[in-house]
Image (spheres, rainbow, N blue to C red):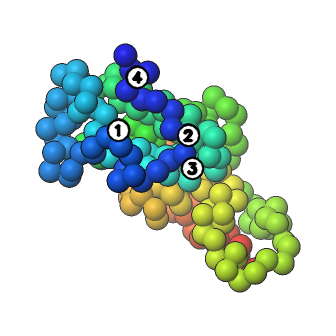
Amino acid sequence: MLAQLVTKPVAFRSPSTMSAPTASPASIPADASAAAAGDRRAFERLYRAHVDRVFAIGVRMLGDRMLAEEVTQDVFVRVWEKLPGFRGDAAFSTWLHRVAVNVVLTKRKTVGVQRDRTVDDENAIDSTQSRHVPVGDRLDLEAAIARLPAGARQIFVLHDVEGFTHEEIGEQLGITSGGSKAQLHRARLLLRAALSR
């Protein structure tokens, strides 16, 4: 049944280009309640409304589109399983984001993605490609984020892209808020260096 709901997308398209209707912001709480009660169509609307954001979280945190596609599917399987326990204390999108981050973190552990919390700046900067590229290509922020060391990329995405506070990041990752701040600073330095080449 769930396999029919969450089909593996070949290419992630914006929800507006998909054939089935998507959930409007106003209908998301009602769709979440209906999906929690087993309504497959409501779950499909939620899936289509949020799949792109979940995929983007996976790409940014893992740096690998194939893994991100797999994680996206894992997230929605987990959401389907846990949806009956969704209390509605927070917005559905906030709850979904938390589930997505937790699934990504688990995937990083299982695939052996490097989880270093700190990296020597000189070594990290030297590991980026130093070939001459046109100015327009140098400003590709997504590529620069993908080249960040795993720990720095994770903190950068959670703080600067997704908007989590250092305290929330520390709680999610099991580090101090000071460690999160240090990694964010390191990530910004590495991005600045990579984008200025």
Question: Mark 4 against mark 3, which lies toward the viewer?
Answer: 4
| On screen, residue 96 above or below 197 | above
| On screen, residue 50 above or below 110 | below
- Residue found at the very far front of the displayed protein: 19
Amino acid, disc 1 = Tyr
Amino acid, disc 3 = Val
Dot 3 or dot 1, earlier in sequence: 1
Residue 131 seen anywhere in this rendered image of the structure: yes
Residue 85 seen anywhere in this rendered image of the structure: no
Q: Secondary structure at mark 2?
A: loop
The residue labelled by disc 1 is: 47
Q: CA distance from mark 4 to mark 2?
A: 15 Å
Please tell me which residue is depicted at 33% across the width and 26% down the height of the picture: 80
Q: Residues within 10 Å of mark 1 (few under 14, many from 20)?
A: many
- Residue found at the very far right of the displayed protein: 131
The residue labelled by disc 4 is: 4
Dot 2 or dot 3, earlier in sequence: 2
